Image (tube, rainbow, N blue to C red):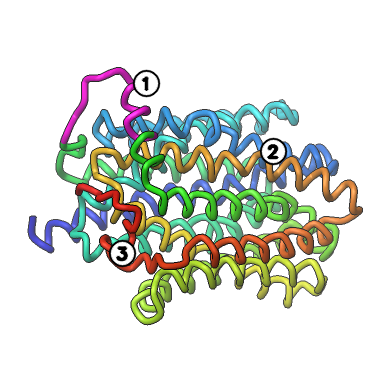
Amino acid sequence: MSHRQTDSRLRWLLASSGTSNLADGIAKVAFPLLATTLTRDPVEIAALSAVQFLPWLLFAIPAGTLVDRIDRKRAMIAANAMRALVVAAVTALLAFGSVEIWTIYVASLLVGIAETVAESAANVLPPALVEEDRLQSANSKLQACEIVGQTFLGGPVGSATFAMFAAFPFLLSSAGFAVGAAVLLGMAGNYRPRQETKSHIRADFADGFRWLRRHSLLLRLLAIAGLLSLISELAQAQLVLYALEDLHLSDAAFGAFAFVGGAGGLVGAGLTPRLARRIGRRTVLIGGVLFCALGFGGMGLVRQPVVSAVLFGVFAAAVVAVNVVLATARHTLVPGELLGRVLGVWRTVVWGAIPLGALLGGLLTKLLGSAGDTFTASGVLLLFVTGYALFALRGHPLDDKTASTGDGVRSQQ
């Protein structure tokens, strides 16, 4: 396949990812803001975040197994169409004044189930679109689409339109998911796994799990990612309460706050490939975890809106850098026909930790008395994760396939 063909197909994926992530970003701001009009209980707010990510705990493995069996482009189209329909239903309920807190939970759960399929498919497509030496760049671009859509644009648009009238952001989100599905029709090609299997789904999952269990480096990376996810979510799930109550921001100003985080994430996506080439992926990953700790810890100690927004941007840049390194490591080390299943196990752990972290964060805020104190606690705990990453990755530079498979397990692309 020529560079022109691969560039064209990658652009279609990026266009769909950017549009659907914008829709997702609008919804992820609009749902919590809608919830705060019904309750200010930190546990109930945290429960919404838990419900949004619960599908990753329950369905990430089935979704990963599914995208190793079917055309990944078609899976993304179907999942985005489902998200469009669910958010359209919320828009209709709002128009008739029939929304209750349980309605928000159910809609968030359904959108999350579809998201497991859409995101799993999107994250295993790059090796089919670009050469191995361009994977890091492709992963950075996918991360940039996610950041620009979800926080850089989605956050401000979601909060600003919610301030106009509550149904507006949900209408925009539904349209965005529909466009994200339609755009993929322009991406030519068949994206079924090269070694299509007719075995039982349970056997497919077992193959992926056994492969991951034998790969000690990926297990260490999974532990780092899971701890980062769990501890970050202690604070992340309380972000809307932190902004509204600790910083005394308005609904519209909350979108501007999220905008700064998006800008930081975009910087992280842009800098990571160059930093990785200059100082190595391992250093970028460990440094990223450290700056996550400093960002959240600082937000808990400094309750000034501008400074807190900058620190949130630091956290966003750092966590994106970590995500780019981890995604590139997976694509480099995992056989293409197993990517969906390994990613399913990975996201069951990493994204499945988010509901637990969210609920613990809500309880912690109730115990400590403020969301800001939960940010401080999250920052301190992330320092310990930094120490673990330093210990776990000794002797693993992550910069090439040979060095990364120091346990003797060879990946087969």
- The earlier-in-sequence mark between 1 and 2 is 2
Query: Extreme bottom residue here?
Result: 278
Query: Extreme left residue here?
Result: 2
Q: Which residue is mark 3?
A: 403
Q: Position of residue 33 (x, y in %)?
A: 72, 47
Of the residues shown, which amino acid type is indicated by label 1?
Arg
Dot 2 falls on a residue whose secondary structure is helix
Dot 3 falls on a residue whose secondary structure is helix
> Quadrant of the image for the N terminus?
bottom left
Left or right: 388 with respect to 77?
Answer: right
Q: Is residue 34 above or below residue 290?
A: above
Of the residues shown, which amino acid type is indicated by label 2?
Leu
> In the image, which residues are magenta?
195-209
Q: Are marks 2 and 3 in contact (CB under 8 Å)?
A: no
Q: Which residue is mark 1?
A: 202
Of the residues shown, which amino acid type is indicated by label 3?
Ala
The residue at 88%/46% (across/down) is: 366
Q: Which residue is mark 2?
A: 48
Q: Is residue 303 above or below residue 360?
A: below
Question: Gap in Å between the C-alphas at discs 3 and 1?
Answer: 32 Å
Q: Is residue 106 above or below residue 183?
A: above
Q: Quadrant of residue 36?
A: top right
